[in-house]
Each structure stands twice: as structure tokens, then as C-alpha cells.
Amino acid sequence: MTEKRVSFDFDIAFSNGGGMQGQGFRLDINGVDISDDELAAYIIKDLRLLMVGSVTILNKEIIEEPHKRTEIEALSESAGIVTEFIDLSHTIKDGMITYKGLPAPLICDHLSFTQSHDHYDAGTEFTIAKIEMVANTGTYLDTPYHRYRDGHDLNGLVLEKVSNVPAVVVRATGMMERGIDWMTFAPIDVAEKAVLINTGWDQHWGTDQYFEGHPFLTEKSAEYLRDQGAVLVGIDTLNIDDTSAGTRPVHSTLLRAEIPIVEHMTNLSALPNDGFHFSAVPPKITSMGTFPVRAHAIISHR
């Protein structure tokens, strides 16, 4: 098929005043034609123009001519780079129990589709949902205020610690002991990383077994991760601490060091050991130390 290009002039008017003109521009096109709106969008994007009020295309002519410019899409395809998103969160459902002794979430309508008919024209309807839940529901993130009165809350969370963070997975499946000691982490570079601990306990989610006998970190593990510079620590179990006692040394150690904790994760087995990024961003709320997150990993590979 003969390659085609478009020759055209343009006149741009900016919404804050002023303008810009161009004559005799030529552009590679796919197919046999291109609309004025498509040309306008291309110019705005390619020149990175802001506050454009209007674009007028003039003297447009389709010509047969070999393409001169390599498309970005073609470059990406030739490089073979694929970006994959892996969901690491449990779904929050009405009546779901995350932790024994804590109430289940109540999800209902504040305004139903039918009720909205009184507020909108015929054929237009909306729903506004309402959820009543404790902060420790589903897959959630702990900030220092969850443990310490003087710790920062969700509002004070530094985004660099929870968004697009380089991450590693520590495999702790099939271990003889429930307590995961610091030596499990010793072979791995955890500095400036989100450290995600894959125990496989998430397979029991939604069953009574999930609440009993879960794996946890030892206090020495928490101290090791703190001292080695971990940015965030996540785990796929009921709790990062041993819940058989009333102390919480892992929470205490990590949160005092302002290292966020993500608990009740899932699907960590789907991740590589390293070479990916992790995000778990909660809403920006004052006077709350914990809230559910949509934890996920971003993996780029060929």
C-alpha cells in the first residue's frame, strides 16, 4: 500500500490571547485521509500547547509520499515493552469480616437510581452509595497514628512511601515456624524498597482458619527492616504481629520509624521477586491512622 502524508497550513488562537501560524506542514498519516479535528489534536499534543482556544486547518492536501517519522507506537512495539498491573487487594463486600471482633462493612444506597428520578430529567439517573465500616477493613494501610498519639495520620502520609515505590517480594511460604525471623530478609536488598512478604496465608481468606495461627514477623525482623532502610512493609496475613499476646512489637517498631504497614494483602505469588513498583495510596483524611487501599504492583517487561 502506498504511504500517504498530509500537507496543510494552520492558524491557532490561544484562549489567553495571541496566536500561532504554520505553513506547508507535512505529516505522515495512516490510511487515506485525516480529519481537521485529528490534525488539530495532533498539533496540540506534538507541540505541547496549552490554553488553545481554536485551531483552523487550511489548504489541506493528501499526497503520496514515503513516511518520514517513526511513530511512538511503532517504537514501543519494536522494543517489546509491556506494562502489567497486578491487583494485590481483597474486595470489600457488604457483611465481610476482616478481623474477628470488628464489625463488618455495611454498604447500601444513600440515593438509589430510582430515587434519583425525582432530581433529574427523564433518562438521566445516578446512584450515590453509602458505606459504614471501621478503618481496618479489607486490605488496609497503617500510619504511625494507628499506634502512636503523636504519630502522623493519613493526612500526613508522604506519597513517596506509598506510590510507585521500587519493591521486592520475600518468600516465606511453607515455613516450619510461624514467626518469620530477620535472617529471612538478610539475602535481599531492602533499602529504599517496599518489602512485601508472601506467606500464602491469603488462601484462607474468607474462612475461619484465616483468623487462627497466621504467620507473623518477629521483633528482630522489624528492627532489621527498619535498620536496613525499608520504605514500607506489607504482608498477606491477618496481622504483621503475633496476635496471641497483647503487645505489638512489629507495629511499634515500624510505625515509630514512620514505615507504613499494609496488611491482608493477596496475590503476592503472582509477583516476581524484584524489578517492579508498588502502590497503596489511601484517602487523605485527618485524625485517622488506618484505611483501606487498592494495593497493586506495576511490572514492565519485554
Image: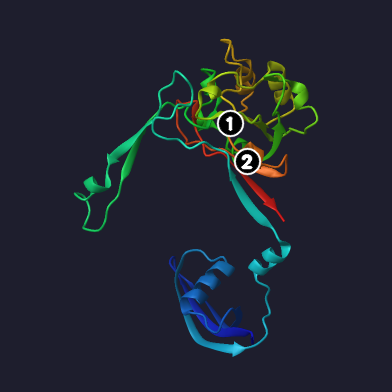
State which tag comes first along the sequence, 1 or 2: 1
Instruction: Locate residue 40, reporting x and y percent.
Output: 50, 74
Name the residue carrying label 2.
278
Question: Which image quadrant for residue 189?
Answer: top right
Decide which of 26, 121 is in the foreground and name it: 121
Instruction: Locate residue 94, reporting x and y percent.
Output: 39, 33
For mark 1, give the secondary structure. helix
Q: Is residue 294 above or below residue 8?
A: above
* Res 201 visible: yes
* Res 165 visible: no
Q: Which mark is residue 97?
A: none
Instruction: Locate residue 11, reporting x and y percent.
Output: 49, 79
* Extreme residue in the top direction: 246
Decide which of 47, 165 is in the foreground and name it: 165
Numbered marks: total: 2
Name the residue carrying label 1.
202
Q: Is residue 229 above or below residue 114?
A: above
Model colouring: rainbow
Mark nearer the viewer, 1 or 2: 1
Instruction: Locate residue 173, reporting x and y percent.
Output: 69, 29
Q: Is residue 20 above or below residue 100?
A: below
**Callout 2: 10 Å neighbours few (<14), some, many (20+)?**
many
Residue at image point 71% right, 32% down: 170
Name the quarter where the N terminus is drawn. bottom right
For mark 2, give the secondary structure. strand
Identify residue type, mark 1: Asp
Question: Which image quadrant for residue 256?
Answer: top right
Query: Marks 1/2: CA distance?
Result: 18 Å
Identify residue type, mark 2: Phe
